[in-house]
Each structure stands twice: as C-alpha cells, then as structure tokens.
Amino acid sequence: MSDLPPLKVYYDGACPICQRDRARYERWAGEAGDQVAWCDVNEHQQTLGEKGVDPEAALLSLHVEEEGGSIQEGIDAYILLMRRVPRLKPLAWLVGLPGIKPALRWYYDRWVRRRLAREGRLP
C-alpha cells in the first residue's frame, strides 16, 4: 500500500485525450495510482462549486484536490500528479521551471479552448 496522501483529480471525462492520459497515468503510477480518485467534472459540478471552483474553470483546466482540501489547477495540478510517478519526476521538475511553466500554461490554455470549441462545448 502506498503511503502517499490521497488526491482527487477533476478532469474532463468527455475528452478522449483526457481519458487516454488518465489511463496512461494509472499504468505508469502503479501503486501510487491507488491513492488517486478520478472525478469527471461533468458529473461533479455541484461538488466543485461547493469548493469554490467555477464549473467553467474546471472544464477549462485540470484541478487536483489534495488531502487537506487545497486545490491546484492547470500546470500546477499536472506537476503534483507527475511528482508521484518516478518516470515523470524529472518532467515535473522541468515543467515547473520559471521560463517553461508560463509558456506551457499559455499553450495548454489555448489547446483546451480550441478542443472545447471544436467539440461545441466551449463555455
């Protein structure tokens, strides 16, 4: 059993790419993946609202809730997840660098908006 604190990951379960990323994470995480609960934002809008997360914001960016209730979003949420997987720890470090993190955030935000617009789900 893993001694990592549990996480709740709020992701877009209607997104095929997000579904593939989740499956890949679960494969790579091994035992650490047992401490991650995956929650589809499309089904947990009320829960997110109660936690102060706008449903639109949840759809536009990955959100991860830590054991104490704090919520990380976007690139910070990805970094939190990647740090749990040995093969992704170096990538988490790289993504967190000051020059790289804002650039990835900019790219990620635009990619999500284009994907949702293409699917007709842009809030």
Image (spheres, grey):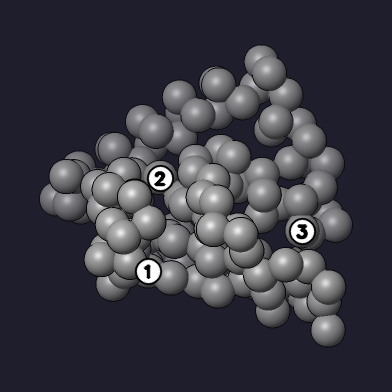
Q: Nearer the viewer, residue 63 or 94?
A: 63
Q: Residue 61 carries which label?
A: 2
Tag 1 residue: 40
Q: Quick check: 88 left or right of 20?
A: right
Q: What amino acid is at disc 1?
A: Asp
Which residue is located at x 66 percent, y 55 percent?
Answer: 81
Q: Mark 3 points at which residue?
A: 84
Q: Residues within 10 Å of mark 2 (few under 14, many from 20)?
A: many
Q: Residues within 10 Å of mark 3 (few under 14, many from 20)?
A: many
Dot 3 or dot 1, earlier in sequence: 1
> Which part of the image, by quadrant, shows the N terminus?
bottom right
| Comes first in the chain, label 2 or label 3 | 2
Q: What element carries label 3?
A: loop
Instruction: State the SS at label 2.
Output: loop
x, y percentage for residue 112?
Answer: 35, 41
Residue occupying the point 45% across, 24% down: 106
Looking at the picture, does residue 121 appear above or below residue 1? above
Point out residue 95 in the picture as x, y percentages from the top left corner: 69, 33
Local crowd at mark 1 within 10 Å, few (<14), some, or many (≥20)?
some
- Alpha carbon separation for disc pair 3 and 1: 21 Å
Q: Is residue 2 left or right of residue 52?
A: right
Amino acid type shown at disc 2: Ser
Q: Of label 2 and label 1, which has the lower sequence position?
A: 1
